[in-house]
Image (cartoon, rainbow, N blue to C red):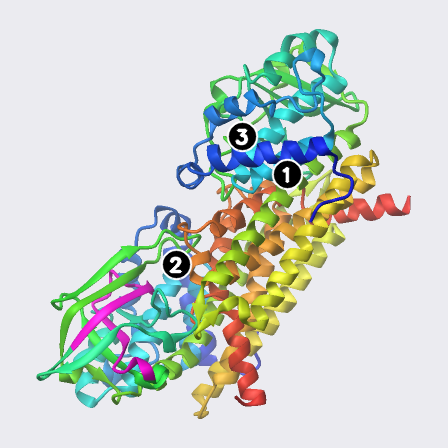
């Protein structure tokens, strides 16, 4: 389904990224997921077609494209490798955060290197639930952490949301064992106030906007997961014969496919729309809708594949795990619903 | 949580299994699944207690307890380690049970006693690459040549496949007859022409074994036929009637295990200075989960107790119990998971394992869709 707001440039971009994902990521995705290896070389290759500085203006070496372009990019990448799409989302968000809130000095130092893929950026994902660990520090999960050159995280300082950019060090090499998104180089990190350099710290004036943007990017990844899972399940249902006919001919399978398609398409439309609106509420609603639907769609995808959905020889097993991790990275859905309810009534 | 119909014996048995699971399994359960190695030392301890033949008469090497006790056993083990629980379930309800019900006296003497004592491990081979939901599509063939059965074909997704000493399996004598051409047989490990194949790399239950089985001109003695010729369909349908309750209770145990961790977590963690359990969004998740789990528990034990009271068939009740419990468990694990935030997706807590494990319960021994067909046939007829 093509959203009417898509411009010619978006359609061309989609074709490019789709080709990249299928040829570059396709052959590697299953093995790297099993081993939990990030696709670092592929990130550098994506930089060659402008995928690492999508929102960054041309003056800083970026592509200067809009949020919808980034979402389309993430969606197409996620259709093949959700882990890789998450890495690209975070990298782009590091650049965008420095561009939107950082000092001129920081922009000059990092933006063009980030946009051209000379350096890779990582960032802490905020789950909105930060149970304090026993040593009183908050443990953060850094996406791209194991291989990024710099990484950022947000923290509260003097009641303001501060964003800190640090050079990566060996403390970040310890990989976190995850159930999904295994090729995203995720590791844990506990910020130490002492080592924070003033120069690399800036205030995020509108933290709600910042988080809403992060979540709408994750929603783009979720849409890619949903659409690809639906596509795989549809193909499988036409090829898999039981009781003398393709299982696609059975009513219960058709119902699942119809639900998957409607949820995947509706999520995509809502996320596209939200990328054009700057309102926080629109973005929150779209992202929660996309996250919940991607869980539903991958779950039913596994179901249609049956036993073959439960093993690593077929793609649904990975999409199912990845969708769950992504949902959590955007914050517990029910907690977010409470916040949306609050926004709706204030 | 109590069930009104539990006897004192059931409650005492449940305590015994619970204690065992806490002492022997709890600490190791995550490692068992992560390493993906079959936990022989645990199984040996379970065997010593006689639980691998819990519900079979003492004369056949069992403990002589009822079906309800067997279901209690699987629930309490699954609550801690589903990989171990599914191994027990496949052994008891899919290997011992059909021999107990359909075996000749000689077969029971020869096979059931060693299985029930846990000296041998059993398995059940029904699914094939092209015969999943549609067991009538069985392609493995059985021909009676000379005085032996000649078996050719392959099975897939067989729980305990590579570790089983003895496997009850199905093969067709006449493919044109579909389900009515199928017969059931027993094959022992080491039989010439029989070889377990590749083990599957799975989403969850990675401490249990799921593998292929291959038969190539495998010759079996005449007496390895289980039940009558062309009645294999009846053998496995009846086996699955009971097997469904096992899968249902596995799902129930996993859901309860997830809820156990959820309750502990929301009591011990705070957000913005307020304990998690004081948030309404958390209360909603916990109360919905507990209610759904209780409803599933009633369906499952109702089916088991009907069986104990000699009900002729528990097809409908078993299918309902499995359908409901497996869907509840996926929902519960996913929701509890979301309370944990990032702690739910890293391996710091076992929650991520519960979610991966439980998804199989909607697929194994008949998908939810097949359960719906079974139930509708019971209600509406064919």
What is the spatial separation of the Cα atoms under label 3 and label 1, in whole angstroms?
14 Å
Identify which residue, B253 or B191, lies in the foreground. Answer: B191
Apparent side of residue B140 relative to residue B305 in the rendered image (left or right): left
Q: Which mark is residue B83?
A: 2
Give x and y (percent) for residue A126: 66, 34
Q: In what element is the residue under mark 2?
A: helix
Give x and y (percent) for residue B178: 35, 81
Q: Are marks 3 and 1 on the same chain?
A: yes
Q: Earlier in the sequence, mark 3 or mark 1?
A: 1
Q: In what element is the residue under mark 3?
A: strand
Q: In what element is the residue under mark 1?
A: loop
Question: Contact, CB < 8 Å: mark 2 with mark 1?
Answer: no
Q: Is residue B63 above or below residue B289?
A: below
What is the spatial separation of the Cα atoms under label 3 and label 2, in whole angstroms?
29 Å
Residue located farthest toward the left when viewing the structure as drawn: B146
* Prevalent SS, magenta region: strand
Identify which residue, B244 or B382, lies in the foreground. Answer: B382
At 46% from the left edge and 38% from the top edge, which residue is drawn?
A26
Q: Quadrant of the C terminus of chain A?
A: top right
Give x and y (percent) for residue B90: 35, 69
At 79% from the left edge and 31% from the top edge, which residue is drawn?
A209
* Residue B333 seen from this side: yes
Q: What is the span of residues highlighted in magenta in the rendered image?
A: B150-176
């Amino acid at each position: 389904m093509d959203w009417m707001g898509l411009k010619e440039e978006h359609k061309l971009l989609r074709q490019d990224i789709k080709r990249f994902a299928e040829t570059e990521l396709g052959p590697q995705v299953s093995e790297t997921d099993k081993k939990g290896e990030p696709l670092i070389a592929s990130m550098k290759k994506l930089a060659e077609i402008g995928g690492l500085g999508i929102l960054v203006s041309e003056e800083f070496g970026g592509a200067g494209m809009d949020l919808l372009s980034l979402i389309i990019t993430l969606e197409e990448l996620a259709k093949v490798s959700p882990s890789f799409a998450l890495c690209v989302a975070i990298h782009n968000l590091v650049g965008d955060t420095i561009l939107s809130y950082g000092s001129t000095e920081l922009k000059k130092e990092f933006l063009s290197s980030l946009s051209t893929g000379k350096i890779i950026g990582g960032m802490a994902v905020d789950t909105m639930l930060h149970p304090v660990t026993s040593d009183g520090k908050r443990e953060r999960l850094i996406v791209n952490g194991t291989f990024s050159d710099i990484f950022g995280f947000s923290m509260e300082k003097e009641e303001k949301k501060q964003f800190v950019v640090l050079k990566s060090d060996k403390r970040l090499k310890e990989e976190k064992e995850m159930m999904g998104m295994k090729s995203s180089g995720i590791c844990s990190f506990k910020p130490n106030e002492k080592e924070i350099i003033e120069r690399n710290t800036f205030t995020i004036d509108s933290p709600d906007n910042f988080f809403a943007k992060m979540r709408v990017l994750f929603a783009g990844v979720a849409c890619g997961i949903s659409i690809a899972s639906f596509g795989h399940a549809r193909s499988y249902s036409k090829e898999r014969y039981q009781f003398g006919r393709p299982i696609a001919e059975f009513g219960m399978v058709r119902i699942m496919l119809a639900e998957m398609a409607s949820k995947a398409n509706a999520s995509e439309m809502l996320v596209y729309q939200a990328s054009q609106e700057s309102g926080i509420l629109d973005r929150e609603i779209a992202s929660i809708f996309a996250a919940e639907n991607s869980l539903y769609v991958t779950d039913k995808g596994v179901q249609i594949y049956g036993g073959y959905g439960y093993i690593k020889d077929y793609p649904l097993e990975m999409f199912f795990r990845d969708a769950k991790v992504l949902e959590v990275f955007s914050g517990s859905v029910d907690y977010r619903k409470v916040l949306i309810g609050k926004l709706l009534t204030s | 949580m109590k069930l009104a119909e539990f006897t004192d014996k059931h409650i005492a048995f449940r305590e015994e299994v619970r204690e065992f699971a806490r002492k022997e399994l709890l600490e190791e359960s995550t490692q068992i699944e992560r390493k993906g190695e079959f936990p022989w030392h645990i199984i040996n301890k379970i065997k010593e207690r006689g639980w691998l033949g819990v519900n079979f008469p003492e004369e056949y090497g069992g403990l002589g307890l009822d079906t309800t006790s067997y279901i209690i056993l699987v629930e309490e083990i699954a609550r801690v380690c589903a990989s171990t629980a599914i191994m027990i379930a496949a052994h008891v309800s899919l290997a011992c049970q059909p021999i107990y019900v359909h075996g000749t006296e000689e077969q029971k003497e020869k096979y059931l006693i060693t299985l029930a004592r846990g000296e041998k491990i059993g398995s059940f081979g029904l699914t094939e690459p092209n015969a999943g939901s549609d067991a009538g599509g069985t392609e493995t063939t059985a021909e009676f040549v000379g005085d032996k059965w000649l078996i050719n074909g392959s099975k897939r997704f067989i729980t305990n496949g590579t570790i089983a000493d003895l496997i009850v399996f199905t093969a067709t004598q006449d493919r044109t007859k579909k389900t009515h051409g199928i017969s059931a047989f027993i094959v022992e490990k080491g039989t010439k022409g029989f070889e377990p194949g590749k083990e599957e790399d799975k989403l969850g239950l990675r401490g249990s074994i799921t593998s292929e089985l291959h038969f190539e001109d495998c010759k079996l003695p005449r007496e390895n036929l289980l039940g009558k010729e062309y009645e294999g369909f009846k053998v496995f349908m009846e086996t699955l009637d009971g097997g469904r309750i096992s899968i249902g209770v596995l799902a129930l145990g996993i859901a309860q295990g997830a809820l156990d961790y959820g309750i502990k977590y929301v009591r011990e963690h705070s957000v913005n200075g307020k304990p998690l359990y004081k948030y309404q969004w958390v209360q909603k998740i916990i109360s919905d989960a507990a209610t759904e789990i209780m409803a599933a528990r009633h369906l499952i034990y109702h089916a088991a107790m009907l069986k104990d009271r000699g009900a002729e068939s528990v097809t409908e009740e078993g299918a309902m119990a499995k359908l409901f419990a497996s869907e509840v468990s996926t929902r519960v694990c996913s929701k509890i998971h979301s309370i944990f935030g990032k702690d739910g997706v890293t391996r710091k807590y076992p929650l991520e394992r519960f979610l991966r494990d439980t998804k199989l319960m909607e697929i194994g021994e008949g998908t939810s869709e097949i359960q719906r067909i079974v139930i509708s046939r019971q209600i509406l007829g064919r």
